[in-house]
Image (cartoon, rainbow, N blue to C red):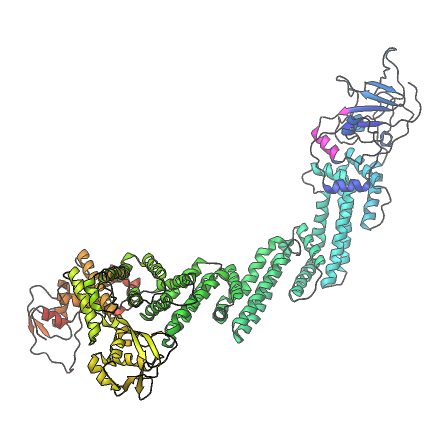
Amino acid sequence: MSNSGKATTTANIRIDSSPSSASNLTQSTLDRFNFKRPSTDSTSNSISATHSTTSSKRTKFQQDVSLPQKDMTDGKDSAAMSARSLIYDLTSSPIHSQSDNALFDGVVSGSNNTSTANAKGKGTLSSSFGDAGRRVSDGWGSRPGSGMVGAVNHSASPVSSGGPKKLIIKGFKNKPTLPVNYEADTWQTLRRAVRAIHESQPVPDSKEELYKLCENLCLHKMASGLYTKLQAECEEHVQSQVALLQTNGTEGEHFLQALETVWTSHCQQMILIRSIFLYLDRTYVLQTSWLLSLWEMGLDLFKKHVMGAPDIKKKAVEGLLNQIRRERDGEVVSKPLLKTLFRALMDLGIYVSVFETPFLDRTETYYRAEADRQFAELEAAPGAESVARYLRHVEERLRQETDRCSQLSGYLDLASRKPLITVVETELVKKGVKLLLEKGFDDLMIHDRADDLSRLYQLLGRVQALDQMRTAFGLHIKKSGLTLVNDPSRDPTMVTDLLAFKLRLDNLLVTSFAKNELFGNSMKESFEHFINQRQNKPAELIAKHLDGLLKSGKGVTEEEVESMLDRCLVLFRFIHGKDVFEAFYKKDLAKRLLLNKSGSVDAEKSMLIKLKTECGAGFTSKLEGMFKDVELSKDIMISFNASPKHKNQLESIDLGVSVLTAVNWPTYPPAEALLPTELEKCQNVFKSYYEERHSGKKLTWVNSLGHCVLKASFPKGVKELSVSLFQAIVMLLFNTIHGSISFSDIQSQTRIEPKELSRTLQSLACGKVRVLTKTPKGREVDPNDVFEFNETFDNALYRIKVNAIQMKETVEEQKRTEEGVFQDRQYQVDAAIVRIMKTRKQLSHTLLIAELYEQLKFPIKPQDLKKRIESLIEREYLERGDDELSRTLQSLACGKVRILTKTQKGRDVDLNDVFEFSETFGIALYRIRVNAIQTKETAEEQKGAEEGLFPDRQYQSFNPDPLRELQGRGCMQL
């Protein structure tokens, strides 16, 4: 073929599709340099050869260093485009061709200025192609066999005249050689570029040519020397920077700025140098495990020479610590500067060893001094506001330190957050827990500072001090509760105050203490403690409060009543003396049922169900019986009114009788009164009716619970008066008396007890509804007072209630209720003692007391239990064991006070001993105490004492009366 025109020689390399290992820096560097392989002018024919590589490593590297694909094929050959064709200038190789012989045999077909060589069969490289030839053909790779065309023979001879024309290409006769001093000259060019980069000057040569020079050195086995020379050049430059920093003469922030400049410049320079020597970094260094990459080499040099210099390291660390201190003090510092330098320490791997330890030490010192100042202020001015201000300060400090370790707004390493926050929490919170709780917790609770309490709860939770806070919480509740319970002047509002106190604590438990179950338990224990310090009064007042809720009232919905009942039930749970509550609740319930005072039967039954759920069916059995009696009484009165025989005897009087089962209802003292003829007749008629239908049953009239409706004729009009039975008796007396009558005459004619009569007359003559007048005027009734009918009485209402004073509970009535409770408790104690002794047969006094405390559901003193045991011994339900008798005789005959004499001398008592009264006994004292012999505690008894089963140690062991014991045995009379 003829040689004509210019031809572009290309080598199409097929790239394996394995993932690229090139870094972002590599790709960005290549893109920045915009490497382009220029086409070459040649008089030879254009030859295109396609060679498929089979080496995965080769393919990977070729893909990593792929250059921008410009001046490539025109896109018509899609297969060539997908193979990522690289433009390669064969004439730019430093290899000089010394032979026109063909490099390999192949079949080439071509037309015009472009020929395509297609390798067929096994024909690739000829066996005469040596190492040099392989390096030439290597092209972009360092391994032989890459399949690149090194040279093209300018002459071609056809093989046959028919069909496609064929060219035979032969290899070089002599191996190509490098120019003299090629390595040294190439390094000088590269060093000139490196120094220009270090001096921030323009690089004299194009980066594409520099990259090609580095590549050629690597391809010709000169990579090791190139790496060593480059490292020495960089090290020399870093050392010069160290000298500049050491002679800078600046301190603090100015020195940090100089250090930042050196670091930033070093990083930028290493990035640019690495882009030029990328072929070295990606081939030789990557395959040599003991060598650092170019970037790591740069970091190592900076770490070794710059940060390895003691004076530079010291000034850098001190400068950083001072900047952080200034920021903590509220000054403005350059966060970008700090962020850059701390990232440098992290990249160099010296953050922890060089900076973190002194940083934590300085932090501890800083916050210890701050805490001392703050605690001194708290000591001088304790209170809720001072503690709240300190808590807000601590919270802000923790937020600041957390932000310093934030990836977005901070500059410290994220790993420093935990130890840093621990130091701050220890100095500002943990060491001041006791002071904070002593100086401000009570005030925060009293003033209901929910936000500040929540802040304190969270801070103490950080240092595992919630147990101490829970203890302070319980103590505050006990102290505040005792103030409410133990002050008699607050009795009228005790229950209301307790409910408000409990509601406030419940809200704090949710809003401030995160519904902590342990805090809830502490609150319950504290309530149970203080509410039982005053044994019976809280139970009585809770029952009275419920009585007020369940009575008829206006302006309260059923839902509100139900809610209040539930809240009262919570207080009821804390009470130990539930029998006291039952007694007063039953008494008030009786009045509500019998006097029609109940506001809602549904509310009454709802409360009954709540008590039954809480305490069991036994607790409410009598209360349920009361409701049954009321319903049964209604049926009885329907039957009575349906009986003409008895109903007609009442004439115009409407009678209502409640027949009550005595065991279910409270015990009422007999209240004697001389009934008017009309009322007495009504009682007798109903009694006759009831006895006819219920033989064997006896009716007892409870006059104190009777009530009547009287029609009174006043000069100014007729009124209906709703009064008690005693009020009715007194007012009916004035039907037969004209004028005035004295207190003593009223008492003699009605036979009402003087105290009851005094309250009755006071309600009629001194209350709001004064149907009688009293002489002299006054609010109290005296035995010498004189009463008469009030002719001038007038009231806008037609039916008027006169019961304000009479229905108030007297002190005697309250005392009777308490005595009834005490009596019931005695029966329960006696039954418990007998029940235990029947089971155990024989038991020491100490263990008996312990079991009684476990079984009894109400508080009782040890001395009261002792009295009940004595009572059972006297009534012969129990007897003392022989050990008790032996100790008794031993105390009388062998102790210091020897009232008896023992025939056989000795300290011990035997069954055969005989005792006599000591005729020679004489002591100067008139009253002598004879101490009983105390027994040693058994292991079980000692364990019970250690576990606190007995609140008072002096009652743990039984000390019987020796003389009473002898009297029981028939030995002596008292």
- Please name the predominant secondary structure of the magenta segment in the image: helix
Q: Quadrant of residue 522?
A: bottom left
Viewer-side residue, 531 vs 557: 557
Which quadrant is home to the N terminus? top right
Vertical relation: 318 (above or below) 803: above
Residue at the location (89% across, 30% down)? 40
Viewer-side residue, 740 vs 224: 740
Q: Position of residue 202 (x, y in %)?
A: 85, 48
Viewer-side residue, 784 vs 438: 784
Quick check: 670 left or right of 101?
left
Q: Quadrant of residue 287?
A: top right
Vertical relation: 745 (above or below) 691: below
**Magenta span includes 58:** yes
Q: Note whether residue 937 is visible.
A: no
Specify start and end residues of the magenta stretch as a single range: 51-63
Q: Position of residue 452 (x, y in %)?
A: 53, 66
Quick check: 172 left or right of 908?
right
Residue at the location (27% across, 79% down)? 731
Q: Position of residue 600 (x, y in %)?
A: 36, 62
User: What count of labels does the image hold?
Assistant: 0
Residue at the location (60% across, 63% down)? 397
Q: Quadrant of residue 193?
A: top right
Q: Position of residue 49 (x, y in %)?
A: 81, 24
Viewer-side residue, 834 vs 9: 834
